[in-house]
Image (cartoon, helix red, strand yellow):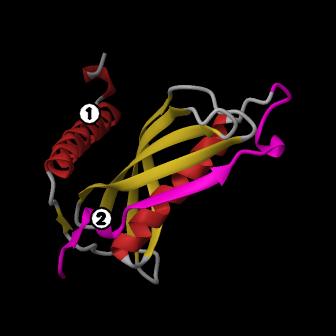
């Protein structure tokens, strides 16, 4: 299976925030932002794997500034790391006020997707070709996050097996 560069699957999506996305004060619900993030990350994963993909986890979700009705969201998503069947996608959300032109960093997230075959089983994905220093840095950081997740899972499994050994 030939590798693919990060730029081949990266996306920038835009979506206008409308009243149905928000509370009565005009603040967009966090769940609306999370949904847009999940959709953008899913597009990246599907473009890389060229298969159906499913969200396996959201490793981190940070809201930096509020999003308001009338803002135009730009959702920038790209691959950070690829495993055998899984992919970590980094997503950055920027909100543009269309009246003032001001742009603010609204949210960031890391999501893991798994490629699945026609039977719903995990399927192999192409390797990731890292071309820039930024891509290599993001890949190193993604590997560190993955190592932490695996260590947490191992600890949880050990605690389930021997609860008295965990405090």
| Residue 122 screen position, x and y as percent | 36, 71
In the shown orientation, is residue 83 left or right of residue 110?
Answer: left
Q: Point out the image quarter for the C terminus.
A: top left
Number of numbered labels in the structure image: 2
| Residue 90 screen position, x and y as percent | 37, 48
* Image quadrant assignment for residue 48: bottom left
Residue lying farthest right?
24
Residue under label 2, please give it: 7
User: Mark 1 or 2 closer to N-term?
Assistant: 2
* Image quadrant assignment for residue 21: top right
In the shown orientation, is residue 90 left or right of residue 107?
Answer: left
Q: Specify start and end residues of the magenta stretch as a single range.
A: 1-25
* Residue at mark 1 to residue at mark 2: CA–CA distance: 36 Å
The residue drawn where x is 61% and y is 42% is 33
Q: Nearer the viewer, residue 112 or 133?
A: 133
Residue under label 1, please give it: 155
The residue drawn where x is 64% and y is 53% is 15
Q: Nearer the viewer, residue 157 or 137?
A: 137
| Residue 30 screen position, x and y as percent | 64, 35
Residue lying farthest front?
100
Q: Point out the image quarter for the N terminus.
A: bottom left
Neighbours of disc 1 within 10 Å: few (<14), some (14-19), many (20+): few
Whether residue 135 is situated above or below residue 128 in the rendered picture? above
Residue 17 within the segment the image draws in magenta: yes
Say if residue 149 shows up in the picture: yes
What secondary structure is marked by label 1?
Answer: helix
Say if residue 122 shows up in the picture: no
Residue 23 within the segment the image draws in magenta: yes
Q: Nearer the viewer, residue 148 or 130?
A: 130
The label nearer to you, 1 versus 2, is 2
The residue drawn where x is 48% and y is 62% is 42
Q: Nearer the viewer, residue 51 or 129?
A: 129
């Amino acid at each position: 299976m030939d590798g693919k560069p990060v730029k081949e699957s990266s996306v920038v999506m835009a979506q206008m925030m409308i009243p149905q996305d928000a509370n009565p004060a005009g603040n967009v619900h966090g769940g609306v932002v999370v949904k847009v993030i999940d959709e953008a990350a899913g597009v990246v994963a599907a473009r890389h794997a060229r298969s159906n993909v499913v969200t396996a986890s959201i490793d981190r979700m940070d809201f930096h500034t509020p999003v308001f009705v009338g803002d135009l969201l730009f959702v920038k998503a790209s691959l950070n790391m690829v495993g055998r069947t899984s992919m970590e996608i980094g997503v950055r959300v920027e909100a543009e006020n269309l009246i003032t032109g001001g742009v603010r960093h609204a949210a960031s997230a890391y999501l893991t997707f798994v490629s699945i075959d026609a039977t719903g089983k995990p399927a192999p994905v192409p390797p990731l070709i890292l071309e820039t220093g930024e891509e290599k840095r993001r890949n190193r950081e993604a590997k560190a996050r993955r190592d932490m997740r695996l260590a947490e899972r191992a600890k949880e499994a050990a605690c389930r097996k021997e609860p008295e050994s965990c405090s």
